[in-house]
Image (cartoon, helix red, strand yellow):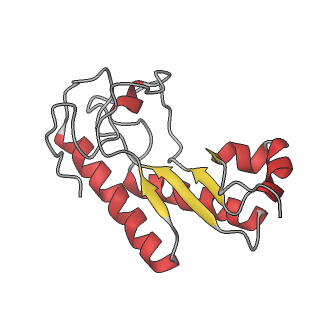
């Protein structure tokens, strides 16, 4: 029996195209993958939303990525360890537009309905808007929370 890891949570690109994925696959009991809709993480539209994607196309991107991973690793349990939709763009405390809340709600409702139908384990990212330890490469990363930086629920779920 040896030491095993429950999983290695990685980005979808790791599981789809990184040669190291094959090396760790024998060591994990399930594949943990972070899947986000495809969008430009560096720019936002006038409503502080991702450019060129709406909740429907975002969900389609999410489910396509999941199915690619499932096809590449048949017979393996795939757990979505992170997904979500940012409600705004910019530093902590940036203005929240109603469209951002609506888009996050719409996207997550689509994902939750799919999860229930497909019997997939999924974790929504994040309970709170992140202020510490956030990946600062994109101003969207501060705003995935169901609760804003003041402790107020955003009304997403």
Total numbered labels placed on residues in the image: 0
Q: Is residue 97 above or below residue 122?
A: above
Looking at the image, which residue is at 82% across and 42% down?
20
Q: Is residue 101 above or below residue 51?
A: below
Looking at the image, which residue is at 22% across and 42% down?
147
Q: Is residue 10 above or below residue 137?
A: below
Residue 104 placement (x, y as % from top left): 31, 50
Looking at the image, which residue is at 30% across and 49% down?
103
In which quadrant is the C terminus drawn?
A: bottom left
The residue furthest front is: 1
Residue 42 placement (x, y as % from top left): 47, 24
Residue 118 placement (x, y as % from top left): 52, 77
In which quadrant is the N terminus drawn?
A: bottom right
Nearer to the camera, 118 or 7? 7
Does residue 27 appear left or right of residue 152 in this picture? Answer: right
Nearer to the camera, 47 or 33? 33
What is the quadrant of residue 94 in the picture?
top left
Does residue 41 appear left or right of residue 7 in this picture? Answer: left
Nearer to the camera, 95 or 144? 144
Does residue 83 appear left or right of residue 98 in this picture? Answer: right
What is the quadrant of residue 96 in the picture?
top left
Looking at the image, which residue is at 50% across and 39% down?
39
Residue 102 placement (x, y as % from top left): 23, 51
Q: Is residue 138 above or below residue 7?
A: above
């Amino acid at each position: 029996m040896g030491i095993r890891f429950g999983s290695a949570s990685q980005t979808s690109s790791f599981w789809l195209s990184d040669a190291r994925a094959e090396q760790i696959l024998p060591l994990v009991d399930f594949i943990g993958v972070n899947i986000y809709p495809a969008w430009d993480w560096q720019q936002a539209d006038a409503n502080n939303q991702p450019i060129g994607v709406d909740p429907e196309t975002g969900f389609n991107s999410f489910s396509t990525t999941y199915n690619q991973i499932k096809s590449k690793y048949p017979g393996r349990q795939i757990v979505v360890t992170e997904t979500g939709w940012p409600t705004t763009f910019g530093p902590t405390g940036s203005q929240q537009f109603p469209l951002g809340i609506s888009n996050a709600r719409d996207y997550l409702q689509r994902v939750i309905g799919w999860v229930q139908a497909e019997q997939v384990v999924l974790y929504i990212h994040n309970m709170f808007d992140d202020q510490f330890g956030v990946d600062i490469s994109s101003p969207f990363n501060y705003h995935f929370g169901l609760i804003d930086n003041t402790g107020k629920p955003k009304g997403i779920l």
